[in-house]
Amino acid sequence: MSEHAQMSTETHAAAREERITAMLHHYEVERFYYDEAALLDAHRYEEWLALFAEDARYFMPIRRTRTQREMDKQFTQPGEMAFFDDTKMLLAGRIEKLKSGRSWAEDPPSRTRHLITNIRIVKDDGRMLEVESNFHLYRTRLNSEETSWIGSRRDVLRRVGGSFQIADRKIFLEQTVLLSRNLSNFF
Amino acid sequence: MAFANSEIDDLVSLERGELDRRIYSDPAIFELEMERIFARSWLFLCHETQIPEPGDFFQSVMGRDNVLVVRQKDGTVRAMLNTCAHRGNAVCRAEEGNAKSFLCTYHGWSYGIDGRLNGVPGFSTFYKGELDKSRHGLAQVAQVASYKGFVFGTHDASAPPLEEFLGATGRLGLDTIALRGEMEVVPGIQKFVIECNWKIAVDNLFDWYHPQITHASAFQPNVLPSVDLRRHNDFEKIDMSGVNMQSGANLELAGSGIVGTKFDQMVVLGEYGHAIGGPTTNSSGYFEFDPTWRDTPQAKAGLGPVGLRVAGHPNIFPTTWATGAQPQISLRIPREPNRTEIWWFTLVDRNLPRETRDFMVSMANRVFGPAGVLEQEDGENWAQATAQSRGIASRRMKHLINMGVGRGKIIKEAGLARIEGLTSEHAQLWTYHSWAQWMKGLPWDELKAATTPGDCI
């Protein structure tokens, strides 16, 4: 084998190794999100909350219909108004509320299905990952109420043990005027 | 006209405290509301701080008319209908932003930020220069005025001036926000849709009978961090299937700051249907995240002796709720008989320290709005109250608004008409009574007379 051919094979093997590592990382994140979605759809909220880091922030900005020239201003920023702007403690409060047996907007409970797709690890320093994903949260309540929320999430995930913790979650809905009566579910 | 005045009187009984349920579903009644209330009344459009610079605009709603509220080069504010004078297309499709002009994307007519028609493609070639551009600007809202930064408009050129329309009660309602400092709107107006009639959303804002049940789940430890419930774990067990609940109104959750019978309440009734209802400052139900603003000389002078005690919820008739726990304006915008849009504007004193401001913003996000721990349940109730009042048999029943009916002794003092006591439905009753007077299409002086509080309600 020529020296050149040998180098090429080694490069090829290294690239392949890199791709396999990337696939494994992707698989880990995907598994984590699928498990998370299953907890939400089963209303296992306390287990869901345990996926969040103690210092986590859960933020869903308000989106505004603006001209193309002002696209940079379509989402509100932290410190401005939002649909959700919660610490882990506040999320815990929401779960207390759901568990109280008197949270009428969720009794009878919503039937939800979280579909998580288009997962992209946009940054990974070994300890922390930034991950973008798309979601479709389908909700139906009572006999006639139907809501579809589609959007994207941008998470900061921390590697902890063999899994992840959500250190930060930003949720970007596609709707501007929210076309539903409430947001009594998690994203 | 489909409704004679006597028929309108039959819809609301001030004596019995009963409402005809058709007012929540009948399309003909909704149409008449559009014409006789929303095309006449002063309506809240936005706050001046949302549009500080020339060309800044905010798109608002008056009835079914979309309105562009625009800051002018000379610092004044104009409001114009968002419809091209040529063929009706919207000239602006953004909710807010900054514009140098407004361009109709149909044929290219363009308007200045003052609404003047500037450009008409083909003006000399196709129109032969024979179009009088001065007559085809954007239609200006008949009257636009500001009260302490709150911008209102009316489609009726003959409506009384804004301050006179607001009267002492409406002004007090807005003063309970304006006098807290140099108020500005926090960016981000929460907007969402509830399948309810707008009046059900409006009358609820005076309702201090519902929190202990509707919002029972919010009075759990840790849900509202400002509420100390650790000492108050005396919740009555609620089981939806077959409970006979008598004690709801007597739940003494003092720590909740909202519910209980140790409650001094004050209802203020104003001309044109404005009202305020809820606790006074010496009530156990009184809670504000920061009550110190009431100690300032400007608050004392501005609110007056009666107003200083008001800690309830003001509504500027028809649809502008000024809430005070955290200063916010909530609009209930009618879209269809069974569809209402809720818009929340949040205000803070721009001189607050960053930390206090952040806390107030986060509490506003947490309490109201579609994810708010209080408002989630409201939407559920209002939608069902609307839906279950529509059936032929269901709508033969009345809605009751008779708590305290006939017992509300009206005290007139310091320019305000008030009722003191425990929880009642006087403010709601006043709102519906005034609604009926508006629905008759009375001339302004007769409308004022018909909505001037008497001695008792």
Image: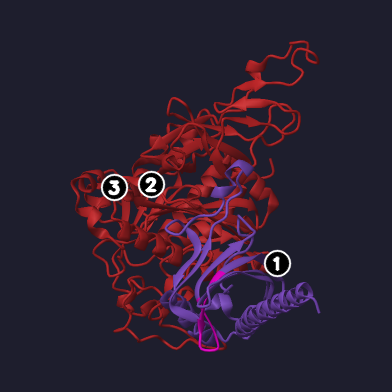
Chain colours: A purple, B red
Residues tagged by mark 3 and mark 1 found on one chain of the structure: yes
B369 within the magenta span: no
Specify the amino acid type for callout 2: Glu
Disc 3 residue crowd, few under 14, some 14–19, many 20+, Cα 10 Å: some
CA separation in Å, label 3 and label 2: 9 Å
The residue lying at 30 percent from left, 65 percent from top is: B286
Which residue position holds label 2? Answer: B184
The structure residue drawn at horizontal position 47% and vertical position 36%, both measured from the top left corner, is B446
Q: How far apart are labels 3 and 1 at the CA level?
A: 49 Å
The foreground one among A184 and B265 is A184
CB under 8 Å between callouts 1 and 2?
no
Q: Is residue B457 above or below residue A66?
A: below
Q: Do callouts 3 and 1 mark residues in contact (Cβ within 8 Å)? A: no
* Residue B110 % position (x, y): 66, 26
Instruction: Using the image, determine if residue A131 lies above or below residue B155.
Output: below
Residue closer to the observer: B234 or B29: B234
Magenta segment range? A155-166
* Residue B17 visible to an observer of this rendering: no
Q: Which residue is mark 1?
A: B391
Q: Which residue is mark 3?
A: B181
Q: Is residue B134 visible?
A: yes
